[in-house]
Image: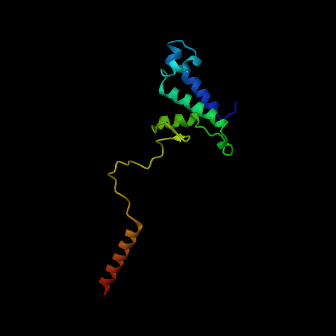
Amino acid sequence: MPSSCKEIRAALAQCLQESDCVMVHRNSAADCLRAPLADTLPTQCQQFKRAFGDCRRGMIDMRKRFRGNQPITFQKLQETEQSGDGYQLYAGKSAFAGGKGVTDGNNSAEPDWRELENQKYREQAAAGADKK
């Protein structure tokens, strides 16, 4: 298998080995990935399963033949998990990382550059009028 999916595959295997489906219920990892038991997996394992499937699909996707298959790596997932940004995937990046701040609608908008120029002009005109 090409190296682009090895890391996600290893992370999925580790997540499956630590899940209750394998540890408590003594099912095989292959059985835990199939339909009736796949819903009992933790959310992180389900996300790894989805990411691994997307990675495998991306290896044969002809639209990615120039840029290459670029899946999110497991280290990036761990970094975002530790920083608290979340690790929901969107286009290979965390969906919630790198936001511009709080956008609750109560923030004041930055003044327009034209308003700033007009304010400078008015101040200069007022200073010029005071000198006369």
Relative to residue 36, is residue 44 depicted above or below?
below
Position in image of residue 41 (x %, y %): 49, 22
Q: Residue at left 31%, top 79%?
A: 126
In this rendering, would 118 be left or right of 60?
left
The residue closer to the viewer here, 109 or 37, is 37
Position in image of residue 116 (x %, y %): 38, 69
The residue closer to the viewer here, 37 or 43, is 37
Position in image of residue 90 (x %, y %): 52, 40
Q: Residue at left 36%, top 78%?
A: 124
Q: Residue at left 70%, top 33%?
A: 2
Relative to residue 76, is residue 21 depicted above or below?
above
Position in image of residue 108 (x %, y %): 34, 56
The residue closer to the viewer here, 107 or 89, is 89
Relative to residue 113, is residue 45 depicted above or below?
above
Color scheme of the displayed model: rainbow
Q: Looking at this rendering, what residue extends furthest in the bottom direction? A: 132
Q: How many marks?
A: 0
Quadrant, the N terminus = top right
Quarter holding residue 75 = top right
Q: Residue at left 35%, top 48%?
A: 104
Quadrant, the C terminus = bottom left
